Amino acid sequence: MMLIELAATIKPVDPPRLYVLNANSLAKQRAVTHLTHDLVRYDADVAVITETHLNQGDTDKNLTVRGYRLLRRDRVGRRGGGVAIYSARQVLIRHSLP
């Protein structure tokens, strides 16, 4: 289990703006481009992406979204699955993995 703790440097009265997407593969052509457009359009602080379908061959460099940090957990041993979390640079995410 992965534990995620958000500590935003945005105003305390402003809740973080979340973006949630079932991507059905970030490895698809132009998927990261579309994601980037949505994150900018919705001014998301944190994006949670399910069904990334990523594996070890998909490097973080190819998944970069300017202004965001990436955390990911790929499904190992089976097709599909996987989760990615993009956090805006002004949002601190602390995580721990078992």
Image (cartoon, rainbow, N blue to C red):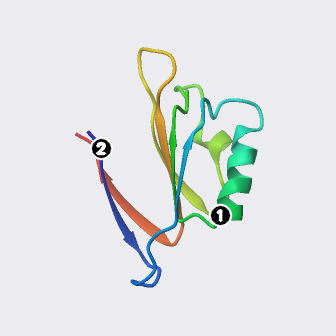
Percent x, y for residue 4?
32, 54
Question: What's the mark number on residue 42?
Answer: 1
For mark 2, does the 10 Å Cα neighbourhood hold few (<14), some (14 to 19), or many (20 or more) residues?
Answer: few
Q: Amino acid at mark 1?
A: Tyr
Q: Please, is residue 14 above or below residue 33 in the view?
A: below
Question: What's the mark number on residue 97?
Answer: none
Query: Quarter holding the N terminus?
Result: top left
Q: Please, is residue 43 above or below residue 69 in the view?
A: below
Q: Residue at x 75, y 46 (%)?
A: 33
Q: Position of 51 compared to 35: left or right?
A: left
Q: Closer to the camera: disc 2 or disc 1?
A: 1
Percent x, y for residue 75?
43, 25
Q: Nearer the viewer, residue 73 or 16?
A: 16
Q: Residue at x 63, y 35 (%)?
A: 26
Q: Amino acid at mark 2?
A: Met
Q: Are marks 2 and 1 in contact (CB under 8 Å)?
A: no
Q: Position of 19 compared to 43: left or right?
A: left
Q: Residue at x 55, y 29 (%)?
A: 54
Q: Please, is residue 64 above or below residue 54 in the view?
A: below
Q: Residue furthest left?
A: 98
Question: Which residue is label 2 attached to?
Answer: 2
